[in-house]
Image: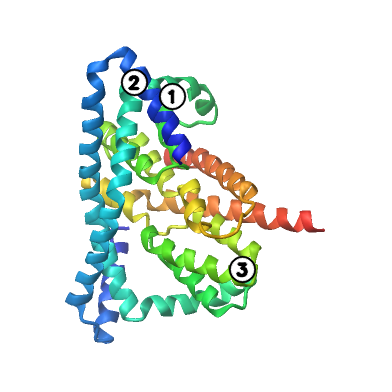
């Protein structure tokens, strides 16, 4: 990220200095201002979802969901580690609900647990599933579209579901079958 | 479709009431986490947005987009999405910025904006996730998983543009 940022930032800065030096400072200030506007929008989204997900967590609903997913995670990730299974299940539930921010801590915990048993396969599979996104409800996007005055903000629900399912299944399948081939 | 979110909220609320959770206290506690989380994002957001503005103002963004648009249009991806697709693996806040720009410029219900929304929702910031997940662990060979994810993200973009045309 640092390398990419430095390259884009410095090349753009140089180019803009050559073309229109008077626009450099306004561009930077404009960017900073936009970041605050964006932060306000994001805060509204997170406030609602983290508030609700806190209720789900405290009432034990999240844990119940995690328990429901456990047979699946145990088979898919090939681990008997209880803590790892629970964290993976929580991570997947948060992802499915479109609360990516809440999902990250669980994934980090799960990967730490898997490290203890040197389960490289499960760590990478969890990474692939998270990196391809597995949302059922794309909450951030729907909220953004609502804020922009969309007539039917949720009508991207089906296309999103289709695409996100495709990306995850495709990547996971390539990884799992690729792994099998290389081993034999 | 409009019922999905309200129904989730009602279910969570009912369950919490049955379990005698202090709704007001816990909901505020959740918002408190959101405050912390949002504040922790601001530094990155500000840095990325400054970069995006420079990138735009210098004309490099348009140059790159024009350069790559033949490749993208070959796969049926509108050239307006090029920037979003290119920045997504590196930065969630950067791609969010472009998604927001697209929605504002073309209108939330336009084909381009719907395409952008689906692309945004169906991929993640691969490099950020790989850095966060595997921080503090001994060296991992992540090249293959990252490559798989990037290829799948590109194919998904192609699929998203197709699907949005039909649905």
Asked if badge 1 and badge 3 are on a common chain, one would say no
Residue at mark 3: chain: A
Closer to us: B138 or B20: B138
Q: Which quadrant of the figure has residue A21? A: top left
Residue B35 appears in the picture as rendered: yes
Task: Count neighbours of disc 1 (C-alpha within 10 A) and say few if under 14, some if 14 to 19, many if 20 or more.
Answer: some
Q: CA distance from mark 1 to mark 3?
A: 40 Å
Q: Which quadrant of the figure has residue A123? A: bottom right
Mark 3: secondary structure: helix
Task: Count neighbours of disc 3 (C-alpha within 10 A) and say few if under 14, some if 14 to 19, many if 20 or more.
Answer: some
Q: In the drawing, what numbered circle is on residue B58?
A: 2
Mark 2: secondary structure: loop
- Residue A83 image position (x, y, % from top left): 52, 77
Mark 1: secondary structure: helix
Question: Residue tagged by mark 3?
Answer: A77
Asked whether the beta carbons under mark 2 and mark 3 sit within 8 Å of each other, the answer is no
- Of tags 2 and 1, which is closer to the observer? 2
Q: Earlier in the sequence, mark 2 or mark 1?
A: 2
Residue B123 appears in the picture as rendered: no
- Residue B40 image position (x, y, % from top left): 30, 54
For image coordinates 32% across by 52% down, the residue present is A140
**Left or right, B128 with reference to A72:** left
**Left or right, B160 with reference to B18:** right
**Left or right, A4 with reference to B5:** right
Residue at mark 2: chain: B
Q: Is residue A129 above or below residue B48?
A: below
Asked whether the beta carbons under mark 1 and mark 3 sit within 8 Å of each other, the answer is no
- Of tags 2 and 3, which is closer to the observer? 2
Residue at mark 1: chain: B
Question: Residue tagged by mark 1?
Answer: B65
């Amino acid at each position: 990220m640092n390398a990419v940022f430095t390259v884009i930032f410095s090349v753009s800065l140089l180019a803009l200095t050559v073309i229109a030096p008077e626009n450099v400072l306004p561009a930077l200030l404009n960017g900073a201002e936009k970041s605050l506007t964006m932060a306000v929008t994001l805060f509204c989204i997170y406030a609602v979802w983290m508030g609700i997900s806190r209720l789900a967590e405290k009432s034990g609903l999240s844990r119940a969901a995690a328990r429901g997913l456990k047979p699946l995670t145990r088979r898919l990730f090939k681990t008997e580690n209880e803590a790892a299974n629970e964290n993976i299940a929580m991570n997947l539930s948060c992802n499915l609900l479109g609360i990516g921010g809440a999902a990250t801590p669980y994934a980090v915990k799960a990967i730490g647990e898997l490290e203890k048993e040197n389960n490289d396969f499960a760590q990478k599979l969890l990474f692939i599933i998270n990196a391809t996104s597995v949302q059922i409800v794309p909450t951030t996007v729907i909220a953004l579209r609502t804020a922009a005055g969309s007539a039917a903000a949720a009508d991207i629900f089906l296309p999103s579901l289709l695409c996100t399912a495709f990306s995850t299944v495709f990547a996971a399948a390539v990884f799992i079958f690729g792994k099998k081939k290389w081993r034999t | 479709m409009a019922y999905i979110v309200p129904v989730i909220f009602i279910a969570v609320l009912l369950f919490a009431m049955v379990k005698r959770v202090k709704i007001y206290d816990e909901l505020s506690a959740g918002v408190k986490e959101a405050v912390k989380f949002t504040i922790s994002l601001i530094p990155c957001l500000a840095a990325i947005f400054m970069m995006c503005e420079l990138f735009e103002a210098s004309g490099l963004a348009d140059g790159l987009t024009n350069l790559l648009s033949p490749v993208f249009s070959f796969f049926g991806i509108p050239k307006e999405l090029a920037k979003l697709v290119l920045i997504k693996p590196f930065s969630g806040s950067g791609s969010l910025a472009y998604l927001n720009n697209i929605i504002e410029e073309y209108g939330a219900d336009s084909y381009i904006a719907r395409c952008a929304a689906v692309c945004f929702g169906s991929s993640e910031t691969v490099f950020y996730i790989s850095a966060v997940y595997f921080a503090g662990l001994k060296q991992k060979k992540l090249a293959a998983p990252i490559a798989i994810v990037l290829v799948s993200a590109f194919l998904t973009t192609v699929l998203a543009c197709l699907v949005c045309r039909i649905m």
